[in-house]
Amino acid sequence: METILEQKVHKKLGFEHLEAVEIVNKLDVLLCNYQIFFHKLQNYHWNVVGGEFFDLHHVTQEMYEKGLKNIDEIAERIRVFGKTPEYRLSEYSKKSEIEETTHELSSEYMTLNLISDIGTLTSFIIETSHTAQDNGDLGTVYMMNKLIKEFETYHWQLSSWTNKKYNS
């Protein structure tokens, strides 16, 4: 039985045009969602108030600093395929399921919203990983595995902080 990798005719990175487009489309949607999430993290970091200020201020800063690195890696992965990653703010909003919020929110609402958004991002990471796996793209699969591990940790930590159990 031949594997997907054995069947491939190796061209640029070993991917046919349609395979590359399918992978890049998933990466691009992930990038758009992550960009909106990134800006939400900055909003929450700058505007959190109340007794949980230091906790949420610290964790959102950690998350957006890691996020900036992750966003760069996703965009550069798209470039590996010879494509241009989305760069327009207007398109981020159009393509993202994650939505912007206001700044006048309680720390509990911010945290619950981040937990929900992590669930959304994780679903896009999994979809991207499956598409990459189906096309024999081990580099993208590796990248998505690292992201999954990171977001699972944040989900667990934020859920624990709110003292609630979440299955998303």
Image: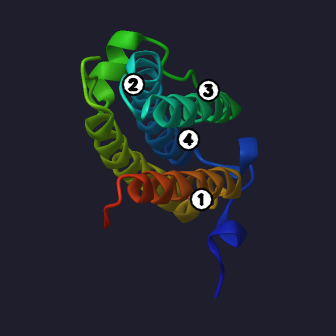
Which numbered tag is attached to residue 112?
Answer: none
Q: Mark 3 — residue?
A: 68
Q: Earlier in the sequence, mark 4 or mark 2?
A: 4
Q: Mark 4 — residue?
A: 17
For badge 1, the amino acid type reads: Lys
Q: Secondary structure at mark 4?
A: helix
Q: Earlier in the sequence, mark 3 or mark 4?
A: 4
Q: Mark 2 — residue?
A: 40
Look at the image and tell me whether residue 75 can be seen.
Answer: no
Estimate the spatial distance between the alpha carbons at disc 1 and disc 2, rounded to whole Å: 21 Å
For badge 2, the amino acid type reads: Lys
Which numbered tag is attached to residue 149?
Answer: 1
Task: Please state which of the two labelled residues, at mark 4 or mark 2, is closer to the viewer.
Answer: 2
Is residue 66 shown above or below 103?
below
For badge 4, the amino acid type reads: His
Q: Secondary structure at mark 3?
A: helix
Q: Secondary structure at mark 2?
A: helix
For badge 3, the amino acid type reads: Leu
Estimate the spatial distance between the alpha carbons at disc 3 and disc 4, rounded to whole Å: 29 Å
